[in-house]
Image (spheres, grey):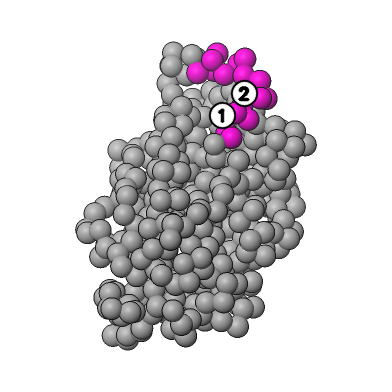
Amino acid sequence: MSKDLPIYVVGAGLGGVAAALGLARKGWKVRIIEATPELGVIGYGIQLGPNVFPMFRALGVEDAVLKHAHFPPDVLMLDALTAKEVVRVPAGESFRARFGDPYVAIHRVDLHGALLDAARAMTNVEILPSTEFASYENLADRVLIKTTDGRQFEAAAVIGSDGLGSAVRRQMIGEETPRPIGYVAHRTIVPMEQVSKEIGRDEVILWGGPGFHIVQYPLRHRSLFNIVAVFQTENIYERADEETYRRVLMETYASAHPLMHEMLRMMDLKRRWVIADRDPIRGWSDGRVALLGDAAHPTLQSFAQGACMAIEDAVVLAECIDVTKGDFARAFKAYERARSLRTARIILESRSLWEFYHLRGIAAEVRNEACADRTEDDVFRCLAWIYDGIRMPEVAG
């Protein structure tokens, strides 16, 4: 098939830009349409496992990502009530020796910027902001896209990378709502000089407690400190002022360790996020239209793999399209076969790990005792199914 007609990517987030970059590097014309007038992502931290670094190499952005990355010596889970160590993942030399690549924390803006700069440098990538997807129509040899302002575009294919509330998914699969789990999150970043030395300022730490947790780690060469406070509430959709949010936060974390209280006092409470995922499904494509990332398989943050899965999707999808020379129906089926079970396992095991983080009473004591004797090898074996990464799929003839 001729590459004259562009492939359209709906959504300019991490997965969408990665998909555009991967396709452009293989010679395809790509247009990214983004509903917002300015390209960007929410400016908080993100963690990346070693499984995503081969993807960065395939996209030509590894050095740009590593330039901004923080390399924690350890990834820890601490008991939120006692501050005792529950699980330690050594993230230094032994980790690199086992998995071949690092575990890093990075500002989401820096990661997005590295991908976006590389995409903008490609002459065959065009980005259209303020262009909101409305619908698609599969034709015999192309796709007709309509936008909410009445414009129409013809595409060789469409990749829906428009997130948890994907409009592309809504048309493809039908009206459905994400699955809220009864938790909300507050996120903030503060200058490192505001953080006391008693708080671990180098590691990635998750404090797991009964119905709540905090995640903390440094960013931008330890100049910034990222804090995420997550907790269970019956009022997940409540909108209130900062004073009310702070009162709820302190009541919820009343039993937490004093170091957690210190971090909570630093929180910016202007906004909170509802935590949700979706049940895994098969069937991410419709003719010349396919889903990617959170539009296909949104997951809880338990393994910090949402962005990694989207970027894996992007590289695999570009490879499938390239190998089939633009036989999109065949490419999309090969992509689904390669990605559906891995991403479904991420969703399902993330739910189990979420429960593990938030156990109460004697169940938490059992967890802590069961984890006490785990060796480094035990921990690495538990993570190998994720961190050993993927192979490019073989596409049937």
Among the 4 quarters of the image, the one containing residue 291: bottom left
**Residue type at numbered disc 1:** Cys
Q: Which mark, by number, is residue 378?
A: 2
Looking at the rendered structure, the secondary structure element under dot 1 is: helix
**Does residue 192 appear in the picture of this structure?**
no
| Residue 50 position within the rendered picture, expressed as x and y whole percent measured from the top left | 64, 45
Q: Quadrant location of the N terminus?
A: bottom left
Q: Residue at x 53, y 44 (%)?
A: 304
Q: Is residue 206 left or right of residue 277?
A: right
| Residue 322 position within the rendered picture, expressed as x and y whole percent measured from the top left | 51, 68
**Does residue 126 appear in the picture of this structure?**
yes
Q: Which mark, by number, is residue 382?
A: 1
Q: Is residue 148 above or below residue 186?
A: below
Other-residue count near label 2 (Cα within 10 Å), few / some / many at <14 / 14–19 / ≥20: few
Q: Residue at x 36, y 75 (%)?
A: 132
Magenta region: 367-384
